[in-house]
Image (cartoon, rainbow, N blue to C red):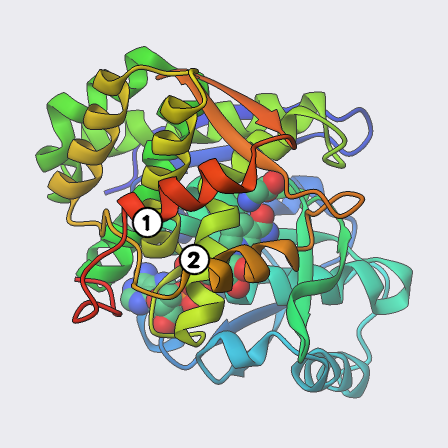
Amino acid sequence: MNTTPLTLHLELGERSYDILIGDGLLETVGERLAPLLRGRQAAVVTNTTVAPLYLERVTRSLAAAGFTVLPIVLADGEETKDWRHWQQVIDRLLEARCERTTALIALGGGVVGDLTGFVAATFLRGVPFVQLPTTLLSQVDASVGGKTGINHPLGKNLIGAFYQPRLVMIDLATLESLPRRELVAGMAEVIKYGIIRDAGFFQLLEERIDQLLNLERTTLGEVIHRCTAIKAEVVAADERESGARALLNLGHTFGHAIESLSGYGRWLHGEAVAAGTVVAADLSQRLGLCGEGDVARIRDLLRRTGLPVTIPAFPTPAYLESMSRDKKVEAGRIRFILVEAIGRAIQATDAPAGTVALALAANMAGTDRATPS
Ligand code: NAD
Ligand code: GLY
């Protein structure tokens, strides 16, 4: 199916761009991109899982619009977000004599998007970049807002650039092939937008979570549209995260500690964010911000979605130590995103360690559950 897409505009002056959301959009990439670009060469970066599913569709559409296409297919996995693969992509671009007008198109999830965006930001000091996100997480979060980068052996996303795409095209149909666990994990970021910014949206999710998980198109389109609209508003107001953009990190400080203590790869990012969001909400209640009812609703919606709502059992000091190494620590103080009420979040750096420890302990699973369930 290929109907008129929902369109959003992210306003960032000369770096502004559109975000299109619809069913079957990949088949129209060429015709939509051609008016935006001077060149007619495009490198499509993807991976071995996504290529057999969608690469031909994209290549055909680009060729029909007059583009010469260079496909670059990487291995699948977070490990490809590194210097070695950055160089591998650059080598391919140089061998193919790509120029400043060559567009770099990311076809895949957040891993492909972050790496391709960073190559686009650095190759020949910057070439046009396009996002074709194919996971729920990358559709509602990673593809919008211009954070690009790679990992360092000492930590995730430590090398990168803010570099905005020229266009984001979200094809809802690609979610049909996404493994259920990845879909559910992406839902944690969807729920996050309701908690930090929109109580009505949170309620809609409570009412329609089953339709959403069944990929019912009207609900799915509406929900992804609302998430990207919130993200676009936040990024337009604070592109480089000097203020409100940090609210998008709800649950992430605890979530990163879960990922790091468990060993990367055991918990999906969204799963760790879900459990981290429960701790953040519980901490907010202990600090006298939100009410018990809000915490219960957050926990309940995450649980109904199929997400973990308890953190794995590691000693509380290990959590505090891990969180103190987060890249968002400022002057040695851990920055928490707290919930005032569903629909309203704030930043705080003054949560007492004792209260944080209580919130961690109260939401810890038994020792038999160190992996998400
Ligand atoms: P991912 O890119 O690893 O994709 C998850 C899995 O799904 C992979 O195996 C992938 O090959 C597969 N896949 C992708 N699309 C598919 C489809 N349509 N059908 C079947 N399989 C498909 O993971 P992700 O959750 O999309 O992204 C995680 C990455 O995003 C992390 O590196 C994280 O740091 C980054 N991230 C970036 C931002 C940002 O603002 N730039 C925000 C959040 C996360
Ligand atoms: N994923 C958080 C951000 O883009 O700022």
Location of mark 2 (residue) = 316
- In this orientation, which residue lies closer to the viewer: 58 or 135? 135
- Labels 1 and 2 touching (C-beta < 8 A): yes
Ligand 1 occupies quarter: bottom left
| Quadrant placement of the N terminus | top left
Report which quarter residue 90 is drawn in. bottom right
- What's under tag 2, amino acid-wise? Thr
9, 316: nearer the viewer: 316
Whether ligand 1 has any atom under 8 Å from the Cβ at mark 2 is answered as: no
Q: Residue at x 69, y 54 (%)?
A: 327
**Which kind of residue does numbered mark 1 sit on?**
Ala
Residue at disc 1, secondary structure: helix
Q: Position of residue 288 (x, y in %)?
A: 42, 16
| Quadrant assignment, res 205 | top left
Q: Secondary structure at mark 2?
A: helix
**In the image, which disc is placed on residue 361?**
1
From the viewer's perspective, is residue 297 above or below residue 371? above
Specify the quadrant that holds the C terminus: bottom left
Instruction: Identify which residue, 16 or 60, lies in the foreground.
Output: 16
Query: From this viewpoint, is residue 364 visible?
Result: yes
Residue 305, label in figure: none
Q: Position of residue 305 (x, y in %)?
A: 16, 42
Res. 41 visible in picture: no
Please report the residue visible at 66 percent of the width from the left and 78 percent of the height from the top: 82
The image quarter containing residue 352 is top right
x, y percent for residue 197: 45, 18
Write the residue at 16% across / 71% down. 368
Q: Position of residue 58 (x, y in %)?
A: 45, 62
Taking the spot 35% from the left edge, 36% from the top edge, the residue there is 190
